[in-house]
Image (tube, rainbow, N blue to C red):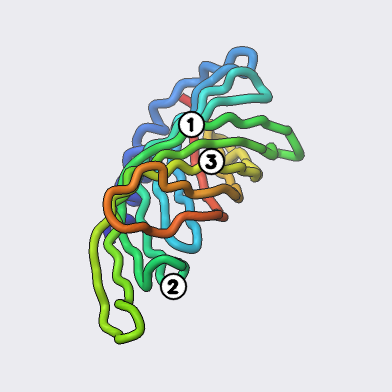
Amino acid sequence: MKAKLYVLGLFFCLANLSAQGQDTNTNGVRTDLGVSIQVYPAGIIPTINLEHYLNEKSSLLFRLGGNFVDRQDFSDVNITEEGEGFGGSVGFRKHYPSGKGKFIAGFNVDVWSLNIDWTDNIGPIGGQVSGSTYTLVVQPWLEGGYFLPIKNTKSQIGLTAGFGREINAITSGDEVEQGFIASISLQYQFSL
């Protein structure tokens, strides 16, 4: 429920800001503001994005947001793992015009501060134990996708796929799952 309210709030705020955007595109250099919703098998990541174009073919991407985790039965470490936290990422993208839109390819590094509540079995005699673990997750990942401009606006919508690895860089408490991750992201952004 928190994730849904967070995403709705982001879209509402950015929709109001999009009417105020001014076209400052000179030699491909511009800045876009937007939102994204990234979905992976064990969670959802809503973010606010700032993409600064260095030229027409490359840009830097900055994201801030929340990471809402529900690993269900994906964890090899515990029976359940649920939690949330905040963080962000820094990335680099290359842009390849194609048709009415463009393909993108990028590399990102996310850092998430997560609190994970978990449950696990106690040996062969049965019973369960539960606890909480704090972990600072570093997540390098590659992305690729396609962006399409929205007619008669300075905005665009894109769909990307990502593949990377979650690494528990700092952990306070019992071990929680880490490993490879794949995701799909829906993004909306407009030129400032």
**Which label sits in the foreground, 1 or 3?**
3
Quadrant of the image occupied by residue 28: top right
Mark-to-mark CA distance, 3 and 2: 23 Å
Tag of residue 73: 2
Q: Secondary structure at mark 2?
A: loop
Rendered position, 191 above or below 117? above
State the residue at coordinates (64%, 13%).
Answer: 27
Tag of residue 36: none
Q: Secondary structure at mark 3?
A: strand
Quadrant of the image occupied by residue 93: top right
Q: Secondary structure at mark 1?
A: strand
Judge by depth and name the residue closer to the eye, 13 or 35. Answer: 35
Inspect the image, locate mark 3, and give the three-letter code of the amino acid beneath it: Pro
Judge by depth and name the residue closer to the eye, 110 or 65. Answer: 110
Residue 16: x, y in percent?
A: 34, 36
Inspect the image, locate mark 1, and give the three-letter code of the amino acid beneath it: Val
